[in-house]
């Protein structure tokens, strides 16, 4: 059999790659439905899709589609190929649309596998999948299942380019990085004198490498009216998070913020969302103040580029830490602030113990 006659069999590699991508994506969504719900919210899909269990059904649907690509003969292989192409086109349209949103959006098309802030690179990745979908549709008209040809001996050479393409596709989906900023701005609490409130409330804070600047005039919309950051920080220090409700990495940061609020009642915790939410929204955190970044004042004044982001407001009218961005950076930031507060409280108790 000549190499030329084997080239059509190599086209089945496109379907094999897509089966691997959507199969893995579906399994990821099955394990983490919350991230899929987050994607539905952030991509601003109609609410009826969530009510109709769309986030829960998408994962199993992708797994079934992957199996259909692998196993079905013609003409059903063609049906699965067309469905895969349409799904890739839909994901691409949603990603392009999200690039025009007024706030950064975390992509969840492939669950946590490819989770990260949507950029032009995300569009390129999806266009690659669309191209593979087109090749798969053409291949489907030849008949025969992918698995059948895979086991048909002499054409196994096309595994080499398929494996190479698989590595490249994995890199594209993973993005090589999380896709969110991770500024390492430490809280000014570091090295503060040992006073229970000194960690973020007095002029005696050692500034180290963090330059404290006045808190900007930023207003967000709370449940009971406007919340002005400079005004609320006149009474106590505040840990402020800027999040997209439902975002996987945001939910982890919010869970840590709830713990922080329970442990440090003398420090306020304000969660500012990128979209409005009802007080009874189940995605809202408990035990904290919630506001909405109406008009994007907070995003613009603090130059926030990704969710979640976090910053610390001192009770002296000055910034005390941040902003930092990215799930890991935010949870680390919260833990650093908590550690400084514990050390300050412990130091304040030492004289009494003596």
Image (cartoon, rainbow, N blue to C red):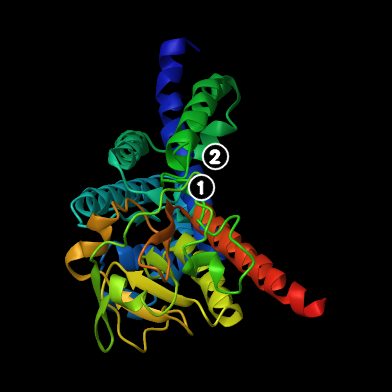
- Disc 2 is placed on an element classified as helix
In the image, residue 22 sits, relative to residue 227, either above or below, namely above
- In the rendered structure, the answer to whether residue 9 lies left or right of residue 198 reads left
Q: Nearer the viewer, residue 242 or 219?
A: 219
Crowd around label 1: few <14 · some 14–19 · many ≥20 (10 Å): some
Residue at the spot 60% in from the left edge and 55% down from the top edge:
191
Closer-to-camera residue (185/353)? 353
**Quadrant location of the C terminus in the rendered image:** bottom right
Residues at marks 1 and 2 touching, judged by CB atoms closer than 8 Å: yes
Residue 68 position in % (x across, y down): 46, 52
What mark, if any, has residue 71 been given in the picture?
1
Crowding at mark 2 (Cα within 10 Å: few <14, some 14-19, many 20+) = some
> In the image, which disc is placed on residue 147?
2
SS under mark 1: helix
Using the image, determine if residue 31 lies above or below residue 2. Answer: below
The answer to whether 197 is drawn above or below residue 173 in the figure is below
Q: Nearer the viewer, residue 294 or 81?
A: 294
Q: Is residue 130 left or right of residue 297?
A: right
């Amino acid at each position: 059999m000549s190499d030329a006659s084997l080239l059509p069999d190599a086209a089945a590699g496109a379907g094999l790659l897509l089966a691997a991508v959507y199969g893995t994506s579906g399994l990821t969504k099955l394990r983490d439905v919350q991230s899929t719900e987050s994607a539905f919210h952030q991509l601003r899909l109609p609410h009826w899709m969530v009510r109709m269990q769309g986030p829960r059904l998408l994962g199993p649907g992708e797994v079934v589609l992957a199996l259909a690509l692998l196993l079905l003969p013609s003409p059903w292989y063609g049906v699965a190929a067309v469905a895969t192409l349409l799904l890739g086109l839909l994901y691409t349209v949603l990603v392009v649309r999200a690039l025009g949103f007024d706030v950064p959006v975390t992509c969840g098309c492939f669950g946590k596998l490819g989770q990260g802030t949507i950029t032009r690179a995300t569009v390129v990745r999806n266009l690659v999948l669309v191209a593979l979908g087109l090749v798969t549709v053409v291949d489907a008209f030849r008949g025969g299942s992918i698995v059948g040809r895979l086991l048909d001996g002499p054409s196994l050479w096309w595994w080499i380019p398929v494996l190479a393409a698989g590595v490249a596709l994995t890199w594209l989906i993973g993005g090589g990085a999380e896709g969110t900023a991770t500024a390492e701005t430490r809280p000014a609490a570091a090295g503060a004198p040992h006073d229970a409130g000194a960690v973020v409330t007095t002029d005696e804070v050692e500034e180290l490498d963090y330059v404290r600047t006045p808190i900007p005039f930023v207003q967000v919309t709370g449940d009971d009216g406007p919340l002005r950051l400079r005004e609320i920080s006149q009474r106590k220090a505040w840990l402020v998070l800027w999040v997209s409700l439902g975002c996987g990495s945001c939910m982890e940061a919010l869970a840590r913020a709830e713990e922080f609020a329970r442990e440090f009642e003398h420090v306020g915790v304000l969660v500012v969302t990128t979209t409005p939410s009802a007080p009874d929204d189940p995605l809202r955190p408990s035990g904290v103040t919630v506001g909405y970044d109406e008009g994007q004042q907070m995003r613009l004044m603090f130059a926030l580029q990704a969710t979640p982001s976090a910053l610390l407001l001192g009770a002296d009218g000055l910034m005390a830490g941040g902003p930092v961005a990215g799930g890991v950076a935010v949870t680390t930031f919260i833990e650093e602030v908590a550690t400084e507060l514990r050390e300050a409280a412990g130091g304040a108790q030492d004289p009494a113990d003596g």
